[in-house]
Image (tube, coloured by chain):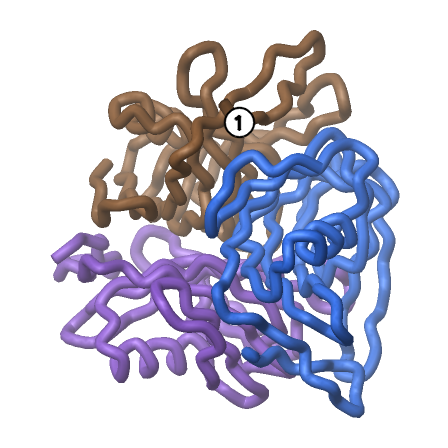
Chain colours: A purple, B brown, C blue
Amino acid sequence: MRVLTGGSFPLLRFDKGDEFPSGLEQWCAMEGIRGAGILCGVGMLSGTDLGVFDGTNYAHCIFEEACEVLSLQGNVAIRDGKPFAHVHASISGHDFQAHGGHLFTGVVAVTLEVVLCVFEKGLVRLPSEGSFRPLDSV
Amino acid sequence: MRVLTGGSFPLLRFDKGDEFPSGLEQWCAMEGIRGAGILCGVGMLSGTDLGVFDGTNYAHCIFEEACEVLSLQGNVAIRDGKPFAHVHASISGHDFQAHGGHLFTGVVAVTLEVVLCVFEKGLVRLPSEGSFRPLDSV
Amino acid sequence: MRVLTGGSFPLLRFDKGDEFPSGLEQWCAMEGIRGAGILCGVGMLSGTDLGVFDGTNYAHCIFEEACEVLSLQGNVAIRDGKPFAHVHASISGHDFQAHGGHLFTGVVAVTLEVVLCVFEKGLVRLPSEGSFRPLDSV
């Protein structure tokens, strides 16, 4: 992964084979980023593990083939002491049909070009009894 | 709804049962925001009323089940003296297929985490004879 | 096309009949913009030429009817001396189903309202032997 622009709106280029969003979480940890918006991401992912939440659990669907990433949106907050990315993605394969959900993980195919908005204020995922942990500021 | 970061790029957390985008319009009215970009929104909506424009009217389709919000983009401008949100959304239900259109309204299920870009310059929706009202700056 | 807000986060309004993203590339050339993120775009496109990459070539699919633009994300960098927009789009027609891919070109129907993030640092597309040219900073 390479950082192509600095400041509050970094553009990150993830390369073939990089894992996303774990690679983003690791970079945020290294940079001490405690809150960010994920504004944009274009490129391709393969082995894309998407989830749809039923209020208690996620149903998963894995899209093995390399798909175009149509949109990438979400945020980074601190959860259990570490940066955690809450990201939703829409993707399309060779039938041009869009599928999407919560992005658990994917492997970058070709490239993934991501723009963040780094917040001065830190964000946290609050503890909760259920599987959903609300976002808050520090 | 809670505001989690300040400044020109507020992150707003809408909670279960909040209506969107009317809740956003109300907040903009309260804060005196007269122009904003809607850059990102992740979470879930139910009772999502989507529209596709045919040049004169919108066809509507209501997605009752709670769906993942894959992407949320648009802007806020003043229309008839009040903030009006022009928002497009893509959503997916339990088949992971993405659907989308102009977002008339939805009810937040679980959460909806939205990032705005507040413009210093105000935006307006111009009067027009048709159903489409062009965006302009003040 | 009209520029509705200034500064580092311009909101551009493309009008009926404008070509996108070539109109955006021309505006960036005129303004001397050498690096930008494309954060958001809502409106409608017709004759939308979308591509899905197979690692070597793009498969194309043209959506003739005017479709809602659900999301628009990407970036602008200098390629062969001129601004080049790498844009992915998701769109929906009257069945509300989302389709998407790399956006080669489309003709604006009704309107297209786009928000950019202009970077101080320039971006370039590196030369390469294959059809994919990596993004880098100057």
Q: How many marks?
A: 1
Q: Position of residue A53 (x, y in %)?
A: 39, 56
In the depicted view, which residue is nearer to us: A43 or C95? Answer: A43
Residue at which label 1 appears: B137
| Amino acid type for the residue under numbered disc 1 | Ser
Residue drawn 26% across the image and 27% down it: B31
Residue drawn 16% across the image and 54% down it: A137
Q: Position of residue C63 (x, y in %)?
A: 84, 48
Residue drawn 51% across the image and 22% down it: B124
In the rendered image, is residue B134 in sight? yes
**Taking B25 as reference, is A2 left or right?**
right
Residue drawn 22% across the image and 42% down it: B3
Q: Residue furthest top?
A: B129
In the depicted view, which residue is nearer to us: A14 or C76? Answer: C76
In the depicted view, which residue is nearer to us: C63 or A12? Answer: A12
In the rendered image, is residue A58 in sight? no
Please tell me whether mark 1 sits on a helix, a strand or a loop: strand
Q: Is residue A74 above or below residue B56?
A: below
**Taking C105 as reference, is C125 left or right?**
left
Q: Position of residue A58 (x, y in %)?
A: 39, 62
Tell me the subunit letter for badge 1: B
Q: Is residue B115 above or below residue C33?
A: above
Q: Is residue B91 above or below residue A119?
A: above
Other-residue count near label 1 (Cα within 10 Å), few / some / many at <14 / 14–19 / ≥20 = some
Quarter of the image with the C terminus of chain A in it: bottom left
- Quadrant in the rendering for residue C109: top right
